[in-house]
Each structure stands twice: as C-alpha cells, then as structure tokens.
Amino acid sequence: MESDQTPETERGTAPLTILVMVAHPDDIDFGNGGSVATWTDAGHRVVYCLITDGDAGGFDEEVSRTDMATLRREEQQAAGAILGVDEFHFLGWPDGRLYVTHELRRDLARVIRQVRPDRVVTQSPTRNLRSMYGSHPDHTAAGEAVMCAVYPDARNPFAHPELLAEEGLAAHTVAEVWISHMGEGADHYVDTTDAFERKVDALRAHKSQTAHMDDLSGRMWGWGRSQAKAAEFGEKRLAEGYLVLDTR
C-alpha cells in the first residue's frame, strides 16, 4: 500500500498535469478536494472537467433548471479557486441522463488531448452495492466513458479522426489513471489532513447542494478518518483513497 504523506514535489517528483474528470459539479470537492489542495500546494497543475451541467441538482423549486446549471458552474469555479484550480472544462451534458456513447467518448478524448495530462483522476466505473450515493449512474457512466477515452480513444490517432483533422489535436497517452471512491479497493492514499478545512470550504461554496447539511464538516471528517485508518496512517490523520492504474 502506498501513501502520499509528504507532497510529491518534496520526494523529487517533477510537477505533473493532473486532469480530474467527473460527472457533476461538487463531485470533485466531495471525493477529491483534499487531494486537489495537496497537489496544487505541491506545485502540480490541476485541471477540472465537469461532464454534466448539474441542472438536476439542488432543492429549490423556484430556481429554473437553466438557472441551476449556471449557478452550479459558478459554484464550481468558486470552489476550485479555494483549492488552487483555475482551469475548467464544462461539457454541458444533461444531468441524470449520462450514458457511455461514442459522442461522449469523443468529447472526453478532446479534453485529454487539449490538456495532455500525466494523470487522469475519475470516478469508479463499477457499481458498489454497499454505496448507493457512490454508485450514482452518472458516476459509473462517467468512469467508464473516461476509461474508454483514455484507452483507446485519446492515444489512437485514428479514433475520432476529426479531432486531429479539424482541430489539430494530436494523440496523447495518459500514463496513469486514479480511480476514486474505491473504499476497500483502494491501494494508494493521499494524506489530506492539512487540506481538510479548505476541502470543507470548497464544499460550502456549492451552496445549492450543501447549505442544508447540518454537519458537513463532521461528515467529511468521519469519511476522511475511515480512509486514513484503511491507509494505516496515524491518529487524527485524514486521507482520500484511490485505485491507481498504469495506463501507459
């Protein structure tokens, strides 16, 4: 089992480009917020790709779905700023109706070729029967589509040929993919203790989604502690876990 108990640049790793690709605005902040803050603090470039517009979220019936999509984009940008992220790709696919299609794979491959990341972080393509929230169908569809975009689409110059012919986007091979929300399946953990308060602040920036949560900080602390225990970190440490895949 591996852990990032010190920033990667302190271990001699050159700065990386890390592309986080998820279904909804706020997914990153719930699952990866501490990691993102840790990575940006260590000098890595982190870029967000939000696949859906999030228009099916929220609880205020007075807010139109069009306005909700706009609001959620603004909330995600505010949350990203808290964690040190200022590069965003909003693909605008409909919330709650995400499927693995050729067109979605093309859109994701386009972003990968534009950003040219060393690492892609995404959601699990596999349903966890013990986690209803972690297995939202948009999440599993996003994870599967991203994996398809990583291999074979983004690296194959003959896949989605219009990306090269019309947009000049050359093929790109992603070296590794990190799958988040793995629970007991994780084999790599990031120590997020020092980034915890910023993670919570980023989540609070998603007011349309989190304002009703009475103990958001406590909930996130409990989840982070469970991950840290699985990582065998010391007492009072927090973590976020991943399954790390070599995709070269």
Image (cartoon, helix red, strand yellow):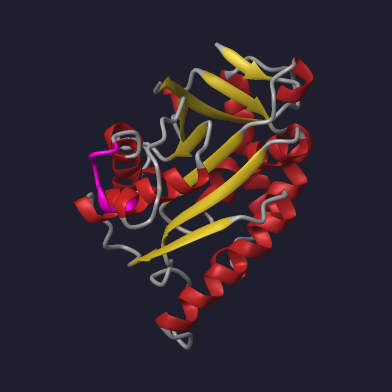
Horizontally, is 94 left or right of 2 in the view? left
Main secondary structure of the magenta stretch: loop
Q: Quadrant of residue 188?
A: top right
As drawn, which residue projects farthest toward the top?
1
Q: Residue at x 46, y 35 (%)?
A: 181
Is residue 215 visible in this depiction of the protein? Answer: no
Q: Quadrant of the N terminus?
A: top right
Of residues 219 and 128, the one drawn nearer to the viewer in this rendering: 128
Horizontally, is 202 left or right of 111 in the view? right
Horizontally, is 137 left or right of 83 in the view? left
Q: Is residue 63 above or below residue 98?
A: below
Q: Residue at x 61, y 21 (%)?
A: 229
Q: Residue at x 32, y 51 (%)?
A: 163
Q: Residue at x 26, y 62 (%)?
A: 97
Give coordinates of residue 149: x percent, y percent. Answer: 32, 41
Of residues 244 and 107, the one drawn nearer to the viewer in this rendering: 107
Give coordinates of residue 60: x percent, y percent. Answer: 49, 80
Is residue 52 visible in this depiction of the protein? Answer: yes
**What's the magenta region?**
157-163
Is 162 inside the magenta-drawn segment? yes
